[in-house]
Structure formats: structure tokens, C-alpha cells
Amino acid sequence: MSQEKFAEEYEVVVVGAGHAGCEAAAAAARMGASTCLITIHLETIAQMSCNPAIGGLAKGHLVREIDALGGLMGLLADETGIHFRLLNRSRGGAVQGPRAQCDKAAYRLTMKKWLEEIQNLRLLQSVVTRLIFEGDRIVGVACQDGTRIKAGAVILTPGTFLNGLIHIGLTSYPAGRANEPPAMELAQSLRECGFKILRLKTGTPMRLDRNSIDWEKFRPQPGDDQPVPFSFRTSRPLKNLIVCYVGYTNEKTHQVIRNNLDKSPLYSGKIKGIGPRYCPSIEDKVVKFPHHPRHQFFLEPEGLNTSEVYVNGLSSSLPYEVQKEILRSIPGLDQARILRPAYGIEYDAVSPAELKPTLETRKFKNLFLAGQINGTSGYEEAAAQGLVAGVNAVLKLRGQEPFILGRHEAYIGVLVDDLISFGVDEPYRLFTSRAEYRLNLRIDNADLRLLPYGFKLGLVSEQEYQRFQEKQGRIKKVIDFLSRERVKDEKGEPIPAVNYLKKPGINWDKLVEKVEIPVELSPEEVRFIESEVKYEGYLRKQEKEISRIIRLDNLLIPQDINYREIPGLTREQVEKLEKNRPENLGRAKKISGITPAAVYNIYLYLEVIRKKGLRDNVPRGTCEPDE
Amino acid sequence: MNQTLEDTIIAISTPAGHGGIGIVRLSGPEALPIARKIFCVKEPEQNIPARTMCFGYLLDDESRETLDAGYLCYFPGPYSYTREEVVEIHLHGSPVLLNEAVRLGIRAGARPAHPGEFTLRAYLNGRIDVIQAEAINDLIRASSLDQARISFKQMEGSLSRKIASAREKIVDLLTLVETSLEFPDEDTEITPEQIRTVLLDLIGDLGRLASSYEQGRALLEGLTVAILGRTNVGKSTLFNALLEEERAIVTPYPGTTRDFIRENIQVDGVLMKLVDMAGFGQASHPVEEEGILRGQKLAEKADGLLVVLDASREESPEDFLLLNKFRNKKKLLVFNKSDLKPAINRQKVLDTCPGVSWVEVSALTGKNLGQLKKMMLETFAPQLEKQEEIILHQRQKVLVDSIKNSLENGLKLLDEGAGEELVAEAIREALPAIGQLTGEIRNQEVLDQIFNRFCIGK
């Protein structure tokens, strides 16, 4: 029994105020829980540690989902965005993803302001050094200054600060972010808890002085003419306030890198952590693709009131002098001044296989983990997990049903399910191809999929919910209208307007040339109708499949089932099943090493029991375990 | 695991090969609705009466083509073999036709039954106990199929390799498509033409695989070998001699065999279905005439012909007529009655069909019958080493076809200019079928090996 004396008490304590921590704290507080958000430094709340952008493919989808659930990220990115693009704009609705570059300082300050305005939420600058448990339940945290804070639930979102180690060339020093202290004691505390700890690596490119770049040498990449907002709540028109530029490395650059690989901590074996393959450093690109004559990079201004420019694509952990040499080899950057050098960083993460789908740890009750600590990378992935953890911490404290999204209903569901089912071998990033039901997980229907949940959880206001319902009403009216109305196709044959819109190559603009729509629609509503019509056949088919999977997944497994009796299971599988005792077939499927065939064997066995009560009379001739 | 016991399953229930009738059986909740989609009952009653034969037609519901006439019999659960809703469709016993019926059923929503699944269901539903299940299994397996399986096992290995390579290509293809979707900002321009090339390549591979099914079927279900010849050349004697038993009635009188008789023989592990039929020539009786007619039809479909000639008599115009009629079939010339004094001008006969092998036998004394069997094998059995990848089971054919369909659909979408995400969707659709085909799901199937060993549909 712990004899700790607590200075304060909250229902929820969130440790770390990055993108995960902010969403977690905001969600918990807005659901009515007294919440404390502890950060090492109040000035760097919601700091964009790496690139100044939110969104992209799959990530933009996540932001829309966070928004539909009443989270902050989308609204904030719209509010502070200075360059907006809809990726894959010319492609189908399912693979369109919004991306925005934000003013980094504004993003951070606005988040802080918004958090300060939330009732029940208290911000605290401190460094958490230890977790306090009573048995297998977390009850609070201890800070560096000796303060102890009691908590019903604790959400850890330490990002790269957890045992962070920065590398520049062969020099390394402990840090959470450049020149910010790491969380060492907390990392130690987690190791002592017995979690499986992973060592991961990421990196960030140099920031250059805007005034030292010869901009003429680069191709401009302006934002979209009609910026698409992230948030369903953003009503003001968005404006592009900056232009980005595209440039390329050259053979000379690559020679510089090759000549200096001995000074790379990555190639000298100094860095042991595993980096993300989808976000390689420039030295990685040059080594792995020796035949590429050039590599693309983007020059992205970090804000309106700063001269810092982010060099997207030149992430590196080579020494400062080599970074300078790299820049000198590129026309237009040959005079560029480095304001912040690029660096690599290694940090600790906990294997997410240790988590429940609520992001609560299996080992310790009421301890939740979210963000990079779970082996993910990306602001959006972090924010989504923060929201899931925040909501579930409160639901747990209230004794309510957990909030778990399925793979078929949200990218958030795909993300969490991937993490807890398979763990990670490298920093995890979401891709649209990870979703089985990609055509249904679209930015244009994120509200339809999730807003009702947000409303039920108390994160979406009555007024927003009503607006959502009105929108659905308008959409239904138009779809009904399009099913009734006939237009002439290319051959002059009259066909229903929906069928016309369904044709490849026909979009909304072409449709409205032929038929007048009686209802005024927003671009988002048009996007939704277009997707629903184009994908209709696929969506119906997937719906059927989903309902069948749900039915199977929900098949209960009796807790006293004797797995040894089930034919065809290997000894290892039996042991895993006995250890985990999954409550239903869906959960059994998620246990590592439990193959689809094993699940099918369990299923058949359950059918035997269900239909015949044949527990003691399992067919002969079954295969022996391990054979 | 995307298959359950709640699916409606379909399979051919009668043994492989030609027969008087063949039965396609469905079991599961949708058995009747699916059956009615593919089988049109002549008296269109609102309700199909239980356990009653209803006359009607097998119908391709897309082309509206009538394929065969037969009977539908509905066994409402639980008064059925599996205790589920069961429908039997009784058709004529042609494997091609029965396979087609199964294909139509699959298109209408059934899925092919796993080996032994009907019995598995009967067991699970309490209809039979384990002992019975095993007994049924033993019964079914007491045929040459077992041997055929073993001898073709190696070929299945080469099939798996072929499929595994198709899977790799599909994964490659998906990589191309997904990369173009996921990284619009990167320098990875992937053109529809690139995707198209890979798709076409794959579709070609799968098409070749699917077409080898006919050959595989012949090996597994046996080769049909028809014995032809004018009357009284000793066809039935030869038939009995090859069979090594007195099966056909033999008399000195022409036209003794009026209908055709079939029996199976094994030649070096290959199943052959020997068909003895009425002699070609002047029919002396309407029954014989009908027999001749049917015999001709059968001979046209057979995998090989034994054209029997009476070496002790002079060649006749009927012999030449026969040889001419089946000019394009694989055949052997059998000069029978070599124990008697030869009278036939053998060279003249051989000149009319160059390249055809011949043998002199005496069905009566058994002379050269071993030689004949050897030649039958060489001439009629498919050349194994040339055609490496052979599909042996209809289940595999269905899967290959379904993969091919998905990919063709992807190609169509690509050519129409539909979005890459839809092309990707079409390709992704093929992955579960590939999984089943390579055996990843199928191999580690089900409850118990006892049921696995079952032949399909019993």
C-alpha cells in the first residue's frame, strides 16, 4: 500500500502537452472530468517539432475524424493555416486528403489559449519523474520538485522526450527536442514497470534563414485556389498566405554525402533505434537509391513572423559542417544560413501490443499511453490516440462502456487496431492502403461516420449536431432528386441523373450543366454526394461483408472453454489462448500467432458446442498439436 | 476466416465422370432461393413442395439459355441430410454440365463446399455421429481417386508455385497502384500503362491456368474411351477382355449390344472409362438405332476412341465411313481377331488415317492386350511433362476464375478511366481467393482431418 502524500487530486492527469496530450486533456475535460495537463515547458504546448504541416493522405482523413469527434486539431489547423492543398484533388473522393501548412508559433499559442479556456482543465509546468501505483492500478504521478499529484487515470504522452538522445554527426546528447531536457526518470519508471520497451529513431531537417535563399532557383508550389478546410466547423474562407518551393539535390550533393558517411551516426552504427522507412534521411536516400540522379525537397516557410524555412526532404543526422556542405552543393541554397541544424533523435517507446483497444495498458489499470510512446510517428496519429485515450480514461472512471472504433468505421479504428494487434517494428504511420474499407473511410463522410459518437460523448455541441442533421437532410433530398430526375447521356438516351454521375469521367460540374439542382449545396456536400454515387456498388458490397464480420467477431467464447480439446491448434496457440482468454472470436483473431485457420477451428468447435453440446465427444482423428 | 457454416454451399454429389444422371446439391439457408435462380421449374408454383421431384430446366440466368432438363427436389430442414435446407438438382450426368450448374450456383450466391463439408454439417447439426461420418468417408474413398490424387500430388506442387508467383505479381501490382495513390507529391509517377501491362500479364497467366482445368479434370475424373466399330467386329469381347470380366453380353449375332455400357479400368494408375456401344451400321431395331445415335454423341465427346476392325474379314465401306467421321479425334486402330486367318487389307486402312497408331490383338485369346493398354495410355492421357500446371479440382478452377474476373474488372475500370482507387479495389478483391487457392486458409482448415479427407459433396 502506498503511503504517498498528494498535493492535489484530479480525475485525469495527462503527462506531456504535445499533439496527443492536448487532445487527451481537452477531451477529458470537456467530458466533464477534472483534468491536469502537465508539460515540461508551457511555451511549447502543441509544438510542431518537425514539419510545419498538418494532414496529407490518411493523415488528413484522421484530422477530419478527430474533428467529427469534437477534437481540436482540424479547427486549429484551419485557424492557423497559411498554405492549403487538397492532395489527389483530381482523383476519387476516397483518396483525397487535405494538407495545410500552419504558422508554427500561431499553432502553439492558439492551442495554449484554447486549452486555457476549457473548463475543468488546468495546465501545469512540471517534470513528471515517477508513476505511483497501488497494486496494479495507477494512482498518481510524482514530479521532479517532489510534488505528488493524485489521479484517477493517467495518460502518458511524452513523445520523443522519453529517454531522448539527439545525434548530430558522431556527437550525441540527451534531449527531448533540440536543447530541451529529456524525460529520463519517467523512462526509467516505465522500464521498471516491466513494459516491453522499443528503441526508435526519427529525425528532422535543418531550418534555413529565408533571407539567405535564392528563391529564383526554385519552382513555386502555391496552395489551392479553393482551399478545403479540415474542420466541418470552419466557415470562414481560408486563404493561402505563403508559397512553398520545390527543389532537387544533385550528383554533387550525393558525392558530399557519400564522402562523409563515416561521420553518419546511422551508418557508423551509433544509432541503434529503428527509423521510419517512409521518411528516410537524405543520407538514406542516397545510399539506398544510388542510381537516382536527384532527390526532391520542399522549402516550407514555418510561419508569417519568422524567417525560418523548413527543408522538407533533407532530414539528416550528419555533422553540422557536412550539412553546410550539402547546402553549398545546391544552387539557390549555396549561401543559405542554417538557423537550426538537422538532427536525428532516438527515444523509447512501449510496444503497443501491451495495450487494450482503449489504449489503457493491459498491465496497469487506468494507465493510458498515447502518441509516439506507442511507436507511432506523426502529429495526426498522436492526436487521434490522445483523443481515444482521453475519452476512454473518462469512460473508465465513470464505469461506462469503452469507446472503440472498428476498422470499418474510422482510420482511428484502423490505427489503434493495427497497433494493438501487431505491435510495431518501425515508427508507425497511417496509409490509406492500411484500411480494408478505404472507399467508405472518406474525408467527406467523416461526420456521418463519427459525429453522432462525438455528440453522444459530449464532445460535439447540440448546435453542431443539429447543423449536421440539416446537412444530411439536404444531401438526402438531392440524392432522391437525382434518382428521379432524368438527363440525356452522350447517346441522347434519357437516364437517371445518378447513373449519369456514376459514369467514369463525369463529375458534378458536368452534371449541373445538364440538370438544375433545387438545393444549394456546399463543396463538402457535393464531394459527399459524388463519392456516394461513384462508389455506390462497392459500398453496398462492403456493408454486407462488414455485417458478416461483425457477427462472427461478436461470437462469444465461453471463459471456461478447454482450448486443448480443439483440434488443429498448436501447443503454442493453446498457450496463448489460455493466457489471453479472449471474450469473443474477434478478440481471439487479434492475438499474435492465432492464424485465420486457428480462428476457424475455434469457430467450428464453438459450433459443435452450440449445436450439439458435444463437449466430451470431439471427433476422432484430429491433428495433434504441433503437427 | 471469411467462410462460415451459415453460407450456402454447393457441389456435385454424384461421382466424377459421365453417368446417366448427375446431382448437384445445395445446403444452407439460401439453398432454395439460389436453386430457383439457376433452375426454372416448369409448373411455376408459388411454393416448391417438399421432397417432390419437380420437372424443369437448368437456366443460365444471365444469357437466359436453357442448358438441360431435369428435376429439382427440395428437402426442407431439418428433414434433410445436413438438417439444413437442402436442394438437389438432378441433371444428365455430364461433368461439363454439372460443373456449369455449380458455377451458376456460385454466381447466384452459393460457395463451393469444402471437401466433406456436407457431412461435416450433418455431423454438426446432429444428423450423424462420428462413426457414421467415418464410415461414409471410407465408402467414398474406396475408389481410384485416391491413387489419382497421389500420382498428381507433384503436379499440385507446381500448381502452387504458379499460384504463388501470381500472388507475387498481384502484390507487385498493388504496390504500383497504391504508391501512385499514397504519394502524390513524390517523384514516383506511375502510369496507367504500367499498371495495364502487369494486369494483362497476370490475366494471361491465370487464363492459361484455367484452361488447363479440362486436362486436369480428365486426369482426376478419368478418361473416357469409346469402343467403336461396325457390328460384330468383337467390340464387346474386347470390352470384357480389357475389363477382365464378363460384363457385356457377347453372342455371335450382330447387334447384340444395343445400348452402351461403361466400366472403369485402371491403366498404370490412370482411370479410364471404357464405353462399349452398339455397332455402327444398319440398325435392326429402333432401340438399336437410338443406341447408335447416343453412341455417336458419346464418341464425339470421348477423350479417345478405339476403332475396332475385324482383321479376319475384308475392310468394308462402313469402316471407312467411321474413320472419316471421327477424323479429328484421338484414336487407335485395333485389328481384332488376329487369332483367325487375316483377310483385311491393313495397309489400305492405314493409308486413310496416316499417323494413327495401330495394334493387332485377339480379344478372345488376350493377345497384345497389354500392348493395347500401354498405347491407350500414351495416346489418350495428357502429356504430363509438357503441361506442368494442372488444375485438378473445380474448387481451384472457381478460385482462379474469380481471381481472373477481379483482375479483368480492374482492367476494365482502368480502361474506362475510373479512379486508381477503384482499380486497386478490384485487385484487392482477388486476395482472399488467392489465399484460399494457395491453401493458406484451406490447408489449415476446419475442425478435424477426418472431414478434410472427404471427397467433395458427400
Image (cartoon, rainbow, N blue to C red):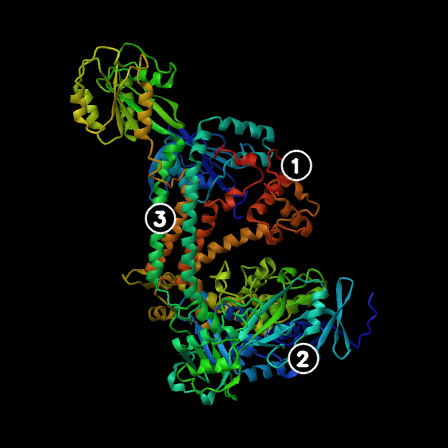
Q: Is residue A534 above or below residue A281?
A: above
Q: Is residue A542 above or below residue A607?
A: below
Q: CA distance from mark 1 to mark 3?
A: 46 Å
Give the residue at mark 3. Answer: B205
Nearest to the eye among marks 1 and 3: give it.
3
Seen from the viewer's position, the closer of residues B207 and B118 is: B207
Asked where in the image residue B36 lies, by quadrant, the reply is top left
Q: Is residue A59 left or right of residue A125?
A: left
Circle 1/circle 3 CB separation < 8 Å: no
Of helix, strand and loop, which one carries label 2? loop
Give the residue at mark 2. Answer: A40
Chain label for disc 3: B
Q: Position of residue B402 (x, y in %)?
A: 41, 47
Q: CA distance from mark 2 to mark 3?
A: 61 Å
Residue at the (67%, 63%) spot, across then down: A360
Q: Is residue B11 above or below residue B255?
A: below
Asked where in the image residue B411 lies, by quadrant, the reply is bottom left
Residue at the (59%, 50%) spot, across then down: A594
Q: Amino acid at mark 2?
A: Ile
Q: How many marks?
A: 3
Chain label for disc 1: A
Count neighbours of disc 3 (C-alpha within 10 A) and say few if under 14, some if 14 to 19, many if 20 or more.
some
Mark earlier in primary sequence (1, 2): 2
Which quadrant: the C terminus of chain A? top right
- Mark linked to residue A614: 1
Circle 1/circle 2 CB separation < 8 Å: no
